Amino acid sequence: MDTNKETRRPKRRRTYDEDFKRHAVALTLEGGRPVRAVAAELGINMHVLYDWRQLYGPRAVADHGPRTPEEKDAEIRRLRAELVRMQQREVILKKSLGILSETPESGMPGSKP
């Protein structure tokens, strides 16, 4: 009979708060150290740290757009207003380019007709 199995306790899973996870991700992004080294320093599995990087890294933050319908509506309004501004800039730039590319007519000092 193996008494070793009877005395073993199941491993308790450690939980980490979001601040700890974000700090760990920041260490991997800022320090110039490999993820393996940061994971060893913090006493966590390297693969867990890679998972956290997917959740809390810069690309993950950028990929998560607005979540609620109100946020989506606000984002649509903001993007439409930006589109109008960009279209206005385009018209102005086209007019400016047309004005600057015209050949000068008579009346310029030093020009001969």
Image (cartoon, grey):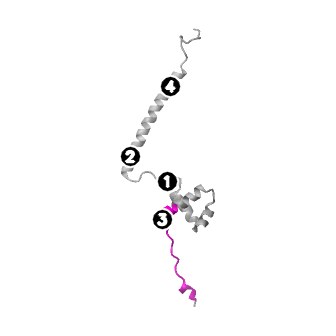
- For image coordinates 58% across by 56% down, the residue present is 29
**Screen quadrant of the N terminus:** bottom right
- Whichever of labels 3 and 2 marks the residue nearer the N terminus, that label is 3
- For image coordinates 49% across by 27% down, the residue present is 94
Q: CA distance from mark 1 to mark 3?
A: 18 Å
Please state the horizontal and vertical placement of residue 98, each as a whole percent of the image.
51, 23
Q: Is residue 84 above or below residue 66?
A: above
- For image coordinates 47% across by 32% down, the residue present is 89
Disc 1 designates what residue?
61
Q: CA distance from mark 1 to mark 4?
A: 39 Å
Whether pointer 1 and pointer 3 mark residues with C-beta atoms closer than 8 Å, the reply is no
Q: Amino acid at mark 3?
A: Asp
Please state the horizontal and vertical placement of residue 104, each as a whole percent of the image.
55, 15
- Whichever of labels 1 and 3 marks the residue nearer the N terminus, that label is 3
Q: CA distance from mark 4 to mark 3?
A: 55 Å
Residue 17 marker: 3
**From which residue to which does the magenta span run?**
2-21
What kind of element bears circle 3? loop
Please state the horizontal and vertical placement of residue 9, each as a whole percent of the image.
52, 81
Q: Amino acid at mark 4?
A: Ser
Q: CA distance from mark 1 to mark 2?
A: 18 Å
- Whichever of labels 2 and 4 marks the residue nearer the N terminus, that label is 2
Disc 2 designates what residue?
74
